[in-house]
Amino acid sequence: MLSKWQIWDFFSSVKPDHLEGASGVFVLNTFDFQSLKLIKDHLLKKISATVHHKLASEVTNEWIENEFMTLSFFSSSESFFIHQAQELNAELLEKLVQLELDNRFIILNFESETASFKKLVKEKSVRILQIEAPRFWETTKLLDFTAAFVRLPLSYDAKTWMLNSLENTFQQFYNSCCLLKLNYPSVTEVSLHQVKELLEVERLDSFYLANIFGKKNFKEFYTQLIELEGDFEKMRSFFLFMQSHLIKVADPSYLEAKDRLSQYDKGILQVSKLWKQEELLQWVGRFNDLEIMAKKKDSALWNELKFSYLRVFQ
């Protein structure tokens, strides 16, 4: 049976002793490493059971038989948390799922929604807890939850700056809130000034950059990119996005099939009037070259971006 939760709902509803006295096989799936750590600690730290951790690569037929299918005085009460369960082959997974356990449990942690995970969901043969990734419109709620979790009182301005300046991921929010809590453990409210003293702008807003590029505001465009010098993966992802975006701008006819246009769609129609198709295709090739440089982690990429910035003034 599948039970889906958003992380803030899970912590407000599920008690730390939820698994006290539990028996059987459970499946867990979270949306990133940080959410896994918090959920795992919440479920395991307050219960009396002894829980051992194993990697899926350590699970064998022999181990399953010795640990669960043979009477053993020493292992009868031990429970297990198996990491990277998506790596288990079909035979081992089937064997684990079919175990009948008393006064002990196994948690199979799937780090991704693989075919084997989806099969378990469809079969409804085990209890499955899934912590879903927040939707893109729920980032404010995610930051609110993270700050509350570490007991960090953020001012409105501080929270707004963090939402606009940091990568909107749980890992980024959690690390940032922990750093702020460590440095301001007793303040009534953490101010914007205090936040800026410790945190730097890290977010790359692809849609904003695509918009100012489309309006030919190259000065602002390159200024934003240069500030992120050193992050090759972020650049690679952005240059790939820009290629896809400019192809849409070059030929926005696909929008005719849509009943309702989003703000992004309306922006494409607006900027498409400012460009010739051949210009856009040249830029697609340009961003492809930059993507390759970022993929190779070629340090010349940063000089290339700086030269492009300087050429804006010529």
Image (tube, rainbow, N blue to C red):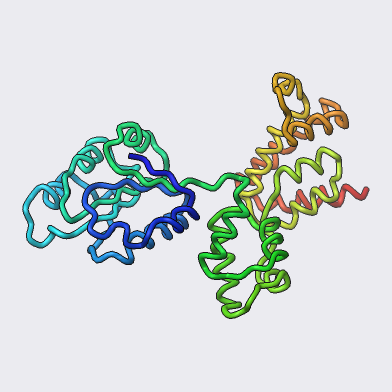
Is residue 65 among what the camera can see? Answer: yes
| Total tally of numbered discs in the picture | 0
Query: Which residue shows up at 36% across the image and 38% down it?
Result: 117
Left or right side of 60 for 36:
right
Above or below — where is 121 with respect to 146?
A: above
The residue at the far bottom in this view is 186
Q: Nearer the viewer, residue 8 or 136?
A: 8
Is residue 111 among what the camera can see? Answer: no
The residue at the far right in this view is 314
Q: Nearer the viewer, residue 310 or 54?
A: 54
Which quarter of the picture shows residue 155?
bottom right
Q: Nearer the viewer, residue 13 or 78?
A: 13
Query: Which residue shows up at 63% across the image and 77% down it?
Result: 188
Left or right side of 178 for 270:
right
Give the image location of residue 83, x and y in percent: 33, 52
Query: Which residue shows up at 72% across the image and 42% down it?
Result: 207
Q: Which of 50 and 232 is in front in this view?
A: 50
Left or right side of 173 for 214:
right
Give the image location of residue 157, x and y in percent: 72, 64
Which quarter of the picture shows residue 136?
top right
Above or below — where is 179 with respect to 101?
A: below
Give the image location of residue 241, x and y in percent: 67, 38
Quadrant the N terminus occupies: top left
Left or right side of 289 for 42:
left
Give the image location of residue 92, x and y in percent: 22, 40
Which quarter of the picture shows residue 10?
bottom left
